[in-house]
Amino acid sequence: MPVDPIPLMVLYTAALPAGKGREIWQQSQSRFYDLQDQSAAEVFAANINIWNINGLILTSGEFSGDRLLRTLRRARSDGFDHYTFLLHRRGQWVANDGERQIESGPGRICSIDFARPILSEVADNDSITLTLPRDFLDEVLPPFDMHCLSLDGVRGSLLYDFLLSLPPRVGQTNGPDAPHLAQAIRHMLAACLSPSRDAAARAQSQIDGVLLQRAKKQIDAHLHERAWGAQHLAAELRLSRSTLYRVFEPYGGVAECIRQRRLARAHIMLADLNERRTVGDIALACGFPNDTSFSRAFRQAYGYAPREAREAATFSARVLGEPGGIAKDERVLVQWINRLRLPTARVPA
């Protein structure tokens, strides 16, 4: 009996009608960034393989250059809490987070923390990216600043060669072996990154970083409880109020962080094509008192109504192409992207 391979999607704009490449680009990238160069989107072309390795997203292929901005507001509100590592076989990528600038080109590997803002400019390129949830890597590494980090030296070269070898290996790996491959990737990343932590510029102390991640896990576990707040979080973490408020001060405070994560959870549910609950039911499941207050807060955070988010997810599921025609199940890539956000398993149905 044949064994299924690791799930693969192909983004191949040449197989689509004129103009569809632009729609694919705008719909996929607008989940992470504000598009800064609309003319680049008009002529966007791509031939990219996209694998889902037990929740890790690996891409390999060619695509057109562009200029992309991830604002602090978007980073704090859209629920994407993961790292991306990228290397280029051809072309160049330049990124700036307001404090430092890094460049990636052939032979170099860089990392991005999607909880942070970034302005990136990429030329026409052939590249590989690996995107994974923060918790997946933080479990085997002490917290340190991996945003706009360029990995140099012997260990950087080892990681570059390892990621370069992944696409052909993944194509030959059976689906049941995906969890083992994901673990091998994690341990290789830990081995290559750990010696760099002392040289990496830190955005916050390691202790505060640990506390913040523990706090976010507790918040995510209680998003459906409307009355749950700072006093409950302090009790769960066994922290004083003053310590808790200090850790969350850069994020606008504890209450604001909880509100943002409620909204992000709701956004994920609205974008889930398998989610059948009404907007009002989703609002209640995410801790909002009613549909009206939820819709007002959602529009303030994202600039559009909850129903528009649901309509946009439906539209984006129709614009994925593959060689030879339209993908058989065009919703899959959208679901993969959404799973990079906050976990939804604890939200009661």
Image: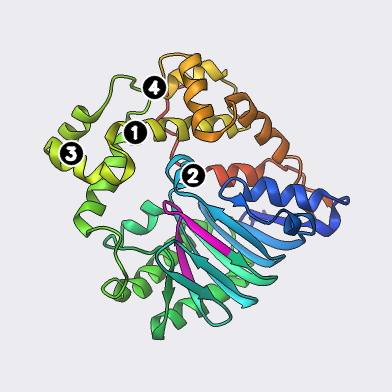
The label shown at residue 287 is 4
Considering every residue shown, the one lying at the far right of the view is: 17
- Residue 16 on the magenta span: no
Q: Residue at x 49, y 33 (%)?
A: 301
Q: Position of residue 171 (x, y in %)?
A: 64, 66
**For mark 1, what is the residue?**
256
Please tell me whether mark 3 or mark 2 is closer to you in this view.
2
Please tell me whether mark 1 or mark 4 is closer to you in this view.
1
Badge 3: few (under 14), some or many (20 or more) residues near its Cα, within 10 Å?
few
Q: Earlier in the sequence, mark 3 or mark 4?
A: 3
Amino acid type of the residue tagged 2 in the rendering: Arg
Asked if the residue under mark 1 is in contact with the one under mark 3, i.e. CB atoms within 8 Å, the reply is no
Q: CA distance from mark 3 to mark 2?
A: 27 Å
**For mark 2, what is the residue?**
74
Q: Position of residue 110 (x, y in %)?
A: 48, 71
Q: Earlier in the sequence, mark 1 or mark 4?
A: 1
Label 4: state its secondary structure.
loop
Q: Position of residue 254 (x, y in %)?
A: 27, 35
Horizontal side, residue 341 vs residue 195: left or right:
right
Q: CA distance from mark 1 to mark 4?
A: 13 Å
Residue span colored magenta: 110-120
**For mark 3, what is the residue?**
237
